[in-house]
Image: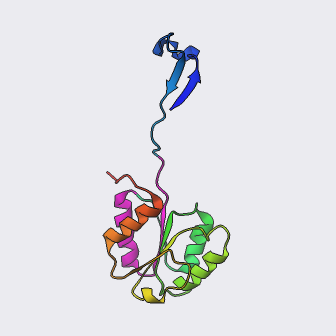
């Protein structure tokens, strides 16, 4: 809500002269929630998480390994959270965690490890969740970092 002293020329009809101000109501933000970057070499897991998150209204970015995730991060706005597998070819999850930690622009992005070998997660993970994936728990963590989303119609 914004208050301005005295009614403006365009709003005089909408405002009684005795009031002496114009009230402008600003609607709640309808901006899209921040994206979720899913990094996993298993196509079935990427697809499952993508469908789940998009159905909830979250934009999703996908990467098949750590190196691919870095390309996504360098070419898109920072996601609200990264969901990261540990065991992947080319660049594994722990290596990506180390690279993100050293990079000024990426070190503040929360990273949630989703892995069958979650006990091997190195430093830098915000949260560690074990596979098989508990989808309700994943949604809860995503909401925590990305805010609520508007479900797709």
Whether residue 39 is in magenta: the answer is: yes
Where does the image place residue 120, in percent across and percent down from the top left?
48, 89
Magenta stretch in the rendered image: 31-57
Vertically, is 71 above or below 17? below
Q: Position of residue 80 (x, y in %)?
A: 51, 63
Q: Quadrant of residue 104?
A: bottom right
Which residue is pictured at 60% across the width and 72% down the height?
A: 71
* Residue 77 within the magenta-colored segment of the rendering: no
Does residue 142 appear in this view? yes
Identify the residue shown where x is 56% and y is 78%.
Answer: 124
Q: Nearer the viewer, residue 52 or 117?
A: 117
Residue 151, given in percent of the width and then of the height, sits at 34, 54
Residue lying at 34% horizontally and 70% vertically, measured from the top left = 137
Q: Please say whether residue 91 is visible from this viewpoint.
A: no
Q: Is residue 14 left or right of residue 138?
A: right
Q: Position of residue 146 (x, y in %)?
A: 46, 60
Residue 21, picture quadrant: top right
């Amino acid at each position: 809500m914004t208050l301005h002293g005295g009614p403006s020329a365009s709003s005089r009809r909408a405002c009684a002269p005795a009031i002496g101000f114009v009230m402008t109501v600003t609607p709640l933000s309808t901006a899209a929630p921040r994206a979720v970057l899913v990094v996993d070499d298993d196509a079935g897991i990427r697809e499952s998480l993508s469908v789940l998150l998009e159905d909830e209204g979250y934009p999703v970015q996908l990467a098949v390994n750590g190196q691919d995730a870095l390309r996504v991060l360098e070419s898109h706005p920072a996601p609200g959270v990264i969901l990261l597998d540990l065991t992947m070819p080319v660049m594994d999850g722990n290596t990506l965690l180390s690279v993100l930690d050293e990079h000024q622009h990426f070190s503040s992005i929360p990273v949630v490890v989703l892995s069958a070998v979650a006990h091997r997660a190195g430093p830098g993970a915000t949260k560690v969740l074990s596979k098989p994936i508990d989808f309700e728990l994943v949604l809860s963590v995503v909401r925590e970092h990305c805010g609520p989303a508007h479900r797709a119609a």
